[in-house]
């Protein structure tokens, strides 16, 4: 990575879109907060500022651990349709945001090296363009009211079917949730974009993942150039979290996975945690990113024996002025990957699971 590259800012306005709510699914404001990312109303970018190019997406391509937002920006659609603003570019890396290589061996870099070596030994059958990648995970997200303390809901199951079609699409996958704190339990709904999106960070097909550079530095440069930064987060934290979202939502070619872990070791502020627990209660090794310029912190969790990715934690970095007056990092969401596999149709559950 070139540390001399300036930050390329993108002009954008934050216009909040309220989804039309069905009376059958009307919820209190606090419950709407909980369902933020499944409903995926969101800040749209200013199209007039980039009339010759596609706007950078203001949302990620999958539901993520929910942060508290004003209730006026949330609503429940009559049918579960997850949307985001499509686009395929982001800000360039900030000056000094990346390191060409870890300056010295640390517990984090050594552990990530071991994880990268283990990833190269895994089997991954290429996914066809007419198939779907299936991921089942447990999730606990914040369902507390705006201005109040974080309250984690009960663990509920999320099933995701990611499409693999080449070219630009508007439906990138399907989602079904079930459990006590799930939104519209048991209903299968599409994950859609406001405009067509092609394979990339916001539509990560197996073929696209296989096309990525396996040189860790080149891969990290690509991630920095395409990752969008949300308000309150640093570029480094945004890239770290984006990598975590990839790990929790796709089946990845071994060479790509290995390069990705080596790339993580090059992000400034990455540290090692001896014990971290995912949403299924499984203890593992944690890799986190600490950045005083970021309002959130993500922990990636790996099995202590196999070194396989098992889940993540999301924290609010609080000084007591947020999250109900609590001082110190506040856990606002946690998940766990339970199954992965490949199926021919969305709605199907694979008989065999992938590593």
Image (spheres, rainbow, N blue to C red):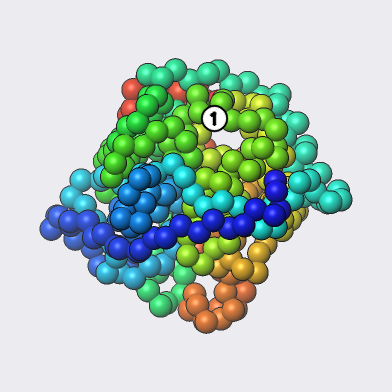
Residue sticking out furthest to the right: 104
Which residue does the image show at 29% across and 63% down from the upper left? 16
Which residue does the image show at 67% across and 30% down from the upper left? 214
Q: Which of 213 and 4 is in front in this view?
A: 4
Neighbourhood count class around disc 1 (C-alpha, 10 Å): few under 14, some 14–19, many 20 upward? many
Q: Quadrant of residue 299?
A: bottom right
Q: Position of residue 177 (x, y in %)?
A: 35, 44
Q: Quadrant of residue 74?
A: bottom left
Count of numbered circles in the view: 1
The quadrant in which the C terminus is found is top right
Residue 35 seen in the figure: no
Which residue does the image show at 29% across and 41% down from the upper left? 195
Residue sticking out furthest to the left: 23
| Left or right of 301, for residue 353 | left
Residue 130 lies, with reference to residue 155, above or below; the image says above
Q: Nearer the viewer, residue 54 or 288?
A: 54
Q: Position of residue 185 (x, y in %)?
A: 29, 46
Q: Position of residue 30 (x, y in %)?
A: 32, 68
The residue wearing badge 1 is: 209
């Amino acid at each position: 990575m070139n540390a001399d590259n300036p930050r390329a800012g993108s002009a954008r306005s934050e216009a909040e879109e309220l989804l039309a709510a069905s009376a059958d699914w009307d919820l209190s404001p606090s419950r709407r907060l909980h369902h933020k990312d499944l409903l995926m109303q969101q800040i749209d970018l200013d199209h007039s500022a980039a009339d010759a190019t596609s706007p950078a997406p203001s949302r990620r391509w999958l539901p993520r651990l929910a942060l508290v937002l004003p209730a006026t920006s949330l609503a429940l659609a009559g049918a579960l349709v997850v949307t985001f603003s499509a686009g395929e570019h982001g800000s360039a890396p900030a000056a000094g945001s990346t390191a060409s290589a870890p300056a010295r061996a640390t517990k984090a870099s050594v552990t990530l090296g071991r994880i990268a070596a283990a990833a190269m030994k895994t089997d991954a059958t290429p996914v066809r363009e007419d198939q779907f990648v299936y991921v089942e995970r447990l999730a606990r997200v914040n369902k507390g009211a705006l201005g109040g303390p974080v309250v984690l809901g009960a663990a509920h199951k999320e099933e995701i079917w990611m499409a693999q079609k080449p070219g630009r699409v508007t439906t990138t996958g399907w989602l079904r949730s079930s459990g006590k704190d799930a939104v519209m339990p048991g209903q299968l709904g599409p994950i859609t974009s406001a405009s067509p999106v092609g394979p990339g960070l916001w539509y990560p097909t197996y073929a696209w993942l296989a096309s990525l550079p396996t040189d860790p530095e080149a891969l990290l440069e690509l991630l920095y150039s395409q990752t969008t930064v949300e308000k309150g987060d640093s570029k480094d934290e945004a890239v770290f979290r984006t990598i975590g979202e990839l790990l929790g939502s796709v089946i990845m070619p071994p060479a790509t996975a290995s390069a990705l872990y080596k790339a993580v070791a090059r992000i400034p502020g990455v540290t090692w945690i001896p014990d971290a627990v995912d949403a299924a209660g499984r203890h593992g090794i944690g890799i986190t990113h600490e950045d005083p310029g970021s309002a959130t912190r993500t922990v990636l969790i790996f099995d202590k024996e196999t070194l396989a990715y098992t889940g993540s934690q999301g924290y609010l970095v609080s000084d007591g002025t947020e999250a109900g007056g609590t001082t110190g990092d506040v856990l606002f969401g946690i998940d766990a990957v339970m199954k992965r596999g490949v199926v021919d149709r969305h709605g199907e559950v694979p008989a065999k699971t992938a590593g």
